[in-house]
Image (cartoon, rainbow, N blue to C red):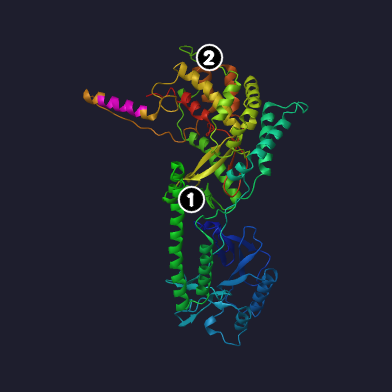
Amino acid sequence: MLNANINPNSYPLSGYSPPRHRPGVTVYHNPNLHTKYIDNINIPHAGSIILQIHDTEQRTNPIHTIINIYRRPHWDPDFTLNLQSTIDQILTKHPRTSITIQGDINIDLLRLTPQHAFTRFLLLNGLHSTITTHTRKDPTHNTETLIDVILTTLAETTTTAGTISPPLSDHLSIYTIFHQPTPRKRRNEQKSLSIQHYEKHKDKILEEIKTAINETQDPSLPTTTTSQNFHSIQLAMQRVIETHERKPKRRKKPWCNPKIRRQIRKQHKLYERRTKHPSPENIRAHSAFRTKLKANIRTAKRKKIEDSLEKSKNNPKQQAKILRSVIPSRSQGRTSPTLIIYEGKTYTDPTDIANALNDRYITIGHKTSQTIPQHEEEHIMPERDDNNPPPFELQPITLADVTKTMNKIDPNKASDIYKIKPAILKEITPFLAPILTHLFNKSISEHEYPDSLKVTKVIELYKSKVQSNPANYRPISLLPIIAKVFDTLINDQMMAHLITNNIISPTQYAFRPNSSTTLALQTILNKIHKHKSQRHPLLAIYVDLSKAYDTISHAKLLHKLRHDFNFTEATTTFFSTYFQNRQQTTHTQNAQSRMQTITHGIPQGSTLSTTFFLPYINDREV
């Protein structure tokens, strides 16, 4: 037991929630369980913590109540009555919950008599002890006692229980395993617009979206800024999409026909009979039927696959999709963390986890940049007058360019923070392109990138290793779809300027048209063969830039664009607003973090990200 003066947080257990502590009692629990502590019920003259396990995340229906207790070794004639009163209060409010009492009660169960008050208490409440051997031995008086108990009303549940040697103190440690499934947190299935539902109701959804967007363009409305206009369009689309969202239905297994379903139900009944009455006959009956069912399921799956391949014999893509569903591969499913340890603190609440991940993604660039040695000459250098390239200024965007870019949208990409699917935006290109063209050009002429296009939704993707470490989750940035269209149009102009005027170093192979890392590898091989034939020594140095995009200084990048690459003052001002007031929120499968402002790095997920990186490292040629 922990001393009451010791901070229980100094005893963290990996994979468990922060402990709840009272004098003589400390409780840890798995954070994946739906648990709730009962703080308004106390047992007089004893330390106690009452924990309830619920079957749903709403925590309104406790299926099991655990009374953790420590009673000091003194005569307390009212202890049994007080314990009975506690159970009565619990059962009055939750009559269907089962009860387990565990801890040191300092009543020797080995010496109980039928007349003892505690014996009557056990019989009255249907409690039985899972521990049947002594838990404390006194070598001085040569006595053995059973005072550390686990008492439970789960009479029909199979248990594995016992003591653990050697003892940690003068008491043996005790344990009980209840062999029954425990309620786990279910995946948070929020409403969404599925591809199937969208395809089924496409005409209606698109018509409603067009009507909603037209309402935002009403000339009788008060004059709004460009950013507000973009925001109104995106919110209008979001409202329509939300009216068509549905909770996802459980996917049906195509091979599971009515006959298989009947056999599965029968197998469940045989399993329940085996669990309640584990006789040799019941065990054999269940095992034999389970083996037969597995064989039938394998046959049904094989037949379904064969039929599907036969039907799609003239469609190679469909056949490849069927085969991919059969061939074992690394799981691509996304699993959000249920426990995160960030900056020395343990988080189990879904919202706290989302906030911790978002804070890491926001601050990692600044923290990493602080570890980079700073030299005087690496700060913003004076303007160079020699060999300046021609000036670059953003030009108005044509309707043809907007239409062409929108038609290239990949409809299979993820929805953005406004829940807008790329497929929807692509479908309404003829209607929306003229509106966007006007707003894009208005933004360029005002030299200001709209704030409503700078809101990023980030989802976390588990990579490997320890799941409680936020560093093992890769951030995937989902920019507004309209912002990606605008960025692509701007990027086309920037890249044309950089390539046409030969501004980018010829040794920069990545992120350029008609170039690739394959070409870089070929260049290296040619140099190796050349120097080898001339018997010259060779040395290769490989450098990996850690958090390269996250550590980019906005001030240094803008200075290079203005003075090294001759971007006009108006265009540089436009790009300075591109980095200002960028907001980011992280969405896990269970919660959404608060909004935070990005202060370092360039936004990932945009075509401009790699193009900004080129001029930033252009003078780092070796």
What's the residue type where badge 1 is placed? Gln
Relative side of 78 to 365, left or right: right
Q: Is residue 331 visible?
A: no
Q: Is residue 10 above or below residue 486?
A: below
On whether residue 608 falls in the magenta region, the answer is no
Q: Where's residue 54, x and y in %? A: 61, 63
**Number of callouts in the render?**
2
Q: For the point 63% across and 38% down, which residue is it?
A: 418
Q: Which of 584/313 is in front?
A: 313
Whether tag 2 and tag 1 are in contact, CB under 8 A, the answer is no
Q: For the point 44% across and 21% down, which residue is it?
A: 504
Q: Which of 582/14 is in front?
A: 582
Mark 2 neighbour density, 10 Å: few (under 14) some (14–19) many (20 or more): few
Q: Which mark is residue 467?
A: 1
Q: For the point 78% across and 27% down, which residue is it?
A: 220
Which residues make up the magenta segment? 519-529
